[in-house]
Amino acid sequence: MTAVSKCSLKMVFAAMFLAFSAGQVSAAVDVAGVKYEESVALGGKQLVLNGAGVRNKFTVKVYAAGLYLQDAQSTVDGVMKSDGPRRMHLVMLRDISADDLGSAFMVALSDNIPPQDKAKIVTQISKYGEMFSQVSFLKKGDTIDTDWIPGVGNQCYVNGKKVGPVIPDILFYNSVLRVWLGDKPVDSALKTKLLALPSKK
């Protein structure tokens, strides 16, 4: 084999390796037909998909949920203490009224807030409830993002559009996460999935 041929062969293998690596980086996790990217950018940081799963109510699939953190965590305490931005990304798997979804969220929020914290965030809870009054109906495929950015606060988005006020309180954001990760989560199987590190998926 000539030196030119060897060089060409090395270039081909290098190109194949780069293409494979790029495919790995852009790989997505499939959750009930919803594609969750392995990483997303938020607040100037790159977040990793900590875990993702489906919220089931009896036999009905309500939505897919994915938790993004700056560093993967396998415990609730680790998530609550994690640094950097965070995102809970929901994708609706069925049509539902915002009132019904909002009521379920508020009940789960109340059920999972430690008693000593409730009095501290009662005003924020009221503001959070206003978010659902701005959206009358959610269709299959609609998205809800609940973001936390240090120095800014908690902001919700429906289909990429801001809804509700910014709430600059990490205690409140952690309380919202307890809807899925608390002692009485809306779906215990989903809680397990959200705390699954990449090697456990």
Image: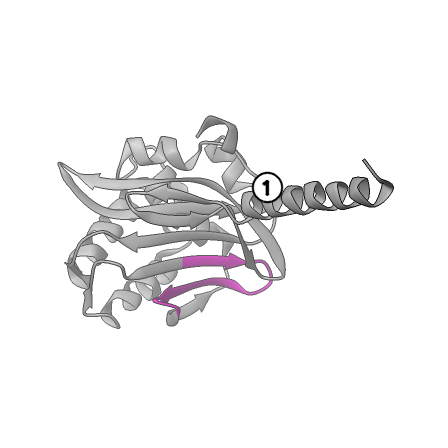
The residue positioned 32% from the left and 36% from the top of the image is 190
The residue lying toward the viewer, choosing from 117 and 194, is: 194
Q: Is residue 3 left or right of residue 74?
A: right
At 76% across and 41% down in the image, what residue appears?
10
Give the magenta range. Answer: 146-160
Q: Secondary structure at mark 1?
A: loop
Q: Is residue 191 left or right of residue 38?
A: left
Q: Which image quadrant is residue 14 in?
A: top right
The quarter in which the N terminus is drawn is top right
Coordinates of residue 35 in the picture (x, y in percent): 38, 49
**Image quarter of the C terminus:** top left
Q: Is residue 142 above or below residue 36?
A: below
- Of 6 and 148, nearer the camera is 6
Location of residue 109 with respect to 123 vertically, above or below: above
Q: Circle 1 is placed at which residue position?
A: 71
Q: Is residue 59 left or right of residue 84?
A: left
Residue 113 appears in view: no
Q: Amino acid at mark 1?
A: Asp
* Residue at the extreme right of the image, as rendered: 3
**Outermost residue toward the top?**
200
Q: Is residue 73 above or below residue 152?
A: above
Which residue is drawn at the image coordinates 56% and 41% (left, top)? 81
Where residue 166 sits: x, y (%)? 45, 68
Say left or right for 2 vs 122.
Answer: right
Which residue is the extreme one toward the left? Answer: 59
The secondary structure making up most of the magenta span is strand
Looking at the image, is 95 positioned above or below residue 77?
A: below
